[in-house]
Image (cartoon, rainbow, N blue to C red):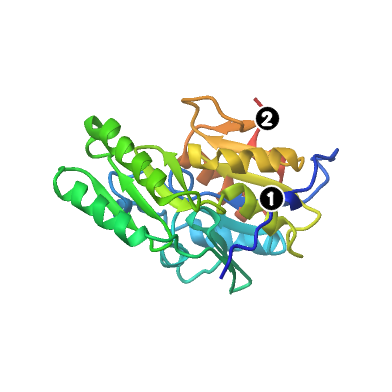
Amino acid sequence: MTNLIDPETIPESRSINAAAQEIALFLDFDGTLVEIAPSPEDVRLDRRVAPALEALRIQLGGALALVSGRPIAFLDEAMAPHRFDIAGLHGAQIRVDGELRAQSDTPAHMHDALRDLVRFANSHVGIIVEDKRISTALHWRLAPELQDEALDLMRATAAKLGPGVRLQEGKAVAELVPASASKGNAIAWLMARPAYAGRRPVFIGDDITDEDGFETVNAMGGLSVRIGGDRQSHAMMRIASPTALRHILLEGAENGGLTASSFGKND
């Protein structure tokens, strides 16, 4: 299925009474709901988080979605038995109300690119290739000394694959994703769905991969929140760590009063 997101549909910035307007909550996964782990398989989600998100989803009238570089299947497993609206693979997959509404096609020659990356990983200790079918990620967190070599390879591979693919760089990872997919476009598309429309978007993330999402919610009069503070960002606010965010989410779920002001004051 062709990606259904049109960046031209992003609403223009508007004046909002932030204290009065109900929010739509968008959450990244790695580095946001969970701490970054040495490898993608090592992440551990606090067992309290998924039930808390389910409570918040109900409180918010369904306006809660995960917006992540992970595939939908992985996020479903992590959140089981709860199922949420999800924009997976940086927006290349979108599921709403249990139905897959948009999915980018696998870029041409991605299999050949994957083979080259696996060959590189097999000859370099600490390099991990993550095959997500529609996208492919190369991780070097366990081999930081190989960052330049890994990035050079990914940039060359992206150039070889052509305009249908873009290179998404993050923390000790780079990923080949369909050019039409982005977290910002996914959030804009979700904001047009009935459960989200008319609310103030709040997006919380931690990485370079979240910056276009921050810019999108800023343009919509929303609130962008970055986890951690070690670099420049388009995010309007910062929260110290995933642990600090979990406290906010758990308290909001228990008290039934999650609003934009729950996340603190603007930078």
Which numbered dot is residue 32?
none
Q: Which residue sits at x=69%, y=60%?
A: 59
Give the number of marks.
Answer: 2
Pointer 2 local density, CA inside 10 Å: few below 14, some 14–19, many at least 20: few
Between residue 58 and residue 220, name the one nearer to us. Answer: 220
Between residue 249 and residue 111, name the one nearer to us. Answer: 111
Which quarter of the rendering shows the C terminus?
top right
| Left or right of 34 on screen, residue 116 | left
Q: Which residue sits at x=42%, y=39%?
A: 170
Q: Which residue sits at x=49%, y=32%?
A: 228
Q: Tell me the kind of residue under disc 1.
A: Pro
- Secondary structure found at label 2: loop
Quarter of image, res 66: bottom right
Quarter of image, res 174: top left
Tag 2 residue: 265
Q: CA distance from mark 1 to mark 2?
A: 29 Å
Q: Which residue sits at x=32%, y=54%?
A: 113
Position of residue 87 measured from the top left corner of the image (x, y, whole percent): 56, 59
Between residue 189 and residue 117, name the one nearer to us. Answer: 117
| Left or right of 213 on screen, residue 45 | left
Q: Residue furthest bottom?
A: 99
Which numbered dot is residue 7?
1
Position of residue 56 measured from the top left corner of the image (x, y, whole percent): 63, 58
Q: Tell me the kind of residue under disc 2.
A: Lys
Between residue 17 and residue 66, name the one nearer to us. Answer: 66
- Secondary structure found at label 1: helix
| Left or right of 183 on screen, residue 130 | left
